[in-house]
Amino acid sequence: MGVVNVTPDSFSDGGRFFDPAAAVEQARRLSAEGADIIDIGGESSRPGAEPVPPEEELRRVMPVLEKIQDLCVSVDTRQPQVMQQVIAAGASMINDIQALTEPYALEAVSATRCAVCLMHMKGTPATMQRRPHYDDVVAEVKTFLRGALRKARFAGIGADRIVVDPGFGFGKSAEHNLQLLRRLKEFAELEVPLLAGLSRKATVGQLTGRPLHERLAGSLALALLALAGGARILRVHDVKETKDVIAVWQAYGNELQT
Ligand code: PT1
């Protein structure tokens, strides 16, 4: 999954693809590099980010979505109004960092054939990194995702339309993120595909001492660890490089096809 942020303030490429034409070009580039899904978002969810009204989110996302309808597009949004509109405009997946907990979000997805990513977050982007605490981060995240999955299934969303995500960096310290990664295999118990987003995040910075634009190698190392833990979808900024990691991972697990 390749990330295209249509925001003025995203953490790693804020403002770069705010212009719809630049966002479309980036989506095409990531797709050509081998991304199976393009994730477009009109609201930043980096630590400290403030919410965006749904009208503004739609103003950012729709012009891009309309020009890449031939691609498998996921839209990163928490707002039911946005979900409804982007699904009508051809989005294949809703990527919700709030796991469809907003009123009417379940309904916005259930009445359609659209897929959904249910993600765990503790708190809100504005406050989530203020001293997050867990007794057992893996147990707590898994319990939350099990509940979100049950609610989605009960609303009529088939298990074949759902993926889950532990939400790396969303109300989690570097140690919490590492614990989730070490025990990622335990999420297989939820019996739906697992998505992992670690690309360029603060944890990479903490582990390597690198600033934002020098986190590629650290991100690729985490991508491999996520694959080893059973992740099936990697949400990344650097598609070409991550595809090489996947190629190595697949060759390692299979006999080489020549
Ligand atoms: C993610 C994700 C996302 N991450 C899904 N959607 C972001 N499904 C946006 C930091 O610690 O992992 N999964 N949508 C980006 N959010 C963050 C969070 C960016 C934390 C940076 C950090 O630096």
Image: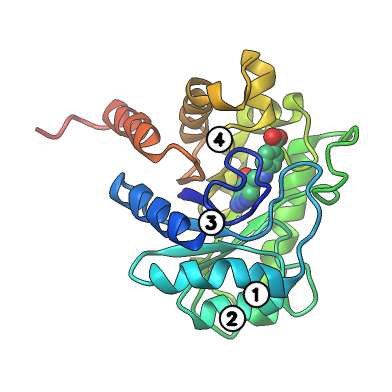
Residue type marked 3: Val
The quadrant holding residue 240 is top left
- Per the rendering, the mark at residue 175 is none
Q: Earlier in the sequence, mark 1 or mark 4?
A: 1
Q: Quadrant of the C terminus?
A: top left
Q: Amino acid at mark 4?
A: Ser
Q: How far apart, in angstroms, are the residues tagged by discs 3 and 4?
A: 22 Å
Q: Say few, some or many: other residues with alpha carbon within 10 Å of mark 4 (under 14 / 14 to 19 / 20 or more).
A: many
Q: Earlier in the sequence, mark 3 or mark 4?
A: 3
Residue topped by disc 4: 199
Q: Which quadrant of the figure shows ligand 1?
A: top right
> Label 3, label 1: how many angstroms apart (C-alpha)?
25 Å
- Of 228 and 72, nearer the camera is 72
Please state which of residues 77 and 179 is positioned toward the viewer in this rendering: 77
Identity, as a three-letter code, of the amino acid under mark 2: Gln
Q: Secondary structure at mark 2?
A: helix
Q: Nearer the viewer, mark 2 or mark 3?
A: 2
Residue 237 x, y percent position in the rendering? 49, 40
Label 1, label 4: how far apart the Cα atoms are = 25 Å
Q: Which residue is mark 2?
A: 85
State the mark number for residue 82.
1
Closer to viewer: mark 3 or mark 4: 4
